[in-house]
Amino acid sequence: MSEITVYGLSVSPFVRKVMVVCAEKGLKAQNISVSPRSIPDELKVHSPLSKIPFAQIRSKWLADSSIICQYIEAIEPSPSLYPAEAYDRARALWFEEYIDSGAIPNVRQITFQRLVNPLLLGVPSDESVVAETVANDLPPLLDYLEGEIGDREFYVGDQLSIADIAVASFLANIMHARVDLDAARWPNVIRHRDAMWQRPSFAKLIEQETHTLKALADQVAAAAS
């Protein structure tokens, strides 16, 4: 039986972040697919803002990916995913916030147009919106990350932290939306991303998500033919 049940769509970067944290800590977690548009009435009390993820952790309920991850860290502190040193911890939380409240909302149209609209809502994607977002909104976000990661293995300190998990989870959605990153402009972002995706905690999830998205695309194509 899983210790943690995470409710939300598996391709959400926020849901993925929580699942990766659980995997890195060796905790058994299951993901129950729930769309923020159709949270069952009996579960709405656990997500009062109708957002995902929300989670049941050993009989206790919490909403918001950052809160969930910090609670998991508190009850299962090893291996630590939050630096002990005060400034490093603040920096790790900053990178998580940069992704959650900055990067993801600013480029949400990429995944919305390429994934949500055609695969979940049955609405054609607007490629002009995708092109504009990729050209104007995504590059500054990646430029900042490129400067911060440099030639280091991790964004903060010398070990894996929530910062690395948040960044790599965000970039998984960019990949699923079929946007290639410029290796000449962002070589270190790509290097770090690829190393993170090779970790078992990420690799299994991304493989499952890729399979799910392909199945949805095949269904849409079959219905249109």
Image (spheres, rainbow, N blue to C red):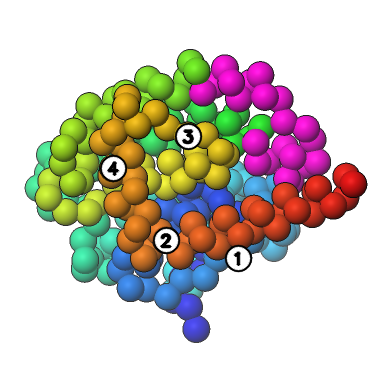
Judge by depth and name the residue closer to the eye, 68 or 166. 166
Disc 1 target residue = 32
Q: Position of residue 135 (x, y in %)?
A: 50, 18
Q: Kindly tell me whether residue 184 is visible in this rendering.
A: yes
How far separated are the C-alphas under marks 4 and 3?
Answer: 14 Å
- Residue type at mark 1? Ile
Disc 4 target residue = 191
Residue at coordinates 70% horizontally, 58% vertically from top-left? 215
Q: Nearer the viewer, mark 1 or mark 3?
A: 3
| Relative vertical location of residue 108 with respect to residue 18 in this rendering, above or below | above
The local crowd at label 2, few if under 14, some if 14 to 19, many if 20 or more residues have their Cα within 10 Å, is: some
Please state if 82 lies on the left or on the right of 50 as rendered.
Answer: left
- Residue 194 lies within the magenta run: no
Q: Kindly tell me whether residue 20 is visible in this rendering.
A: no
- The secondary element bearing badge 2 is classed as helix
**Nearer the N terminus, badge 2 or badge 4?**
4
Q: Nearer the viewer, mark 3 or mark 2?
A: 3
How far separated are the C-alphas under marks 3 and 2?
Answer: 18 Å
Disc 3 target residue = 180
- Residue 118 lies within the magenta run: yes
Labelled pair 1, 2 in contact (Cβ < 8 Å): no
- The secondary element bearing badge 3 is classed as loop
Labelled pair 1, 3 in contact (Cβ < 8 Å): no
Residue at coordinates 40% horizontally, 59% vertically from top-left? 202
How far separated are the C-alphas under marks 4 and 1?
Answer: 31 Å
User: Magenta region: which residues?
Assistant: 114-134
**Nearer the N terminus, badge 1 or badge 2?**
1
Residue at coordinates 33% horizontally, 61% vertically from top-left? 199
- Residue type at mark 4? Arg
| Relative vertical location of residue 217 with respect to residue 101 in this rendering, above or below | below
Q: Position of residue 197 (x, y in %)?
A: 37, 54
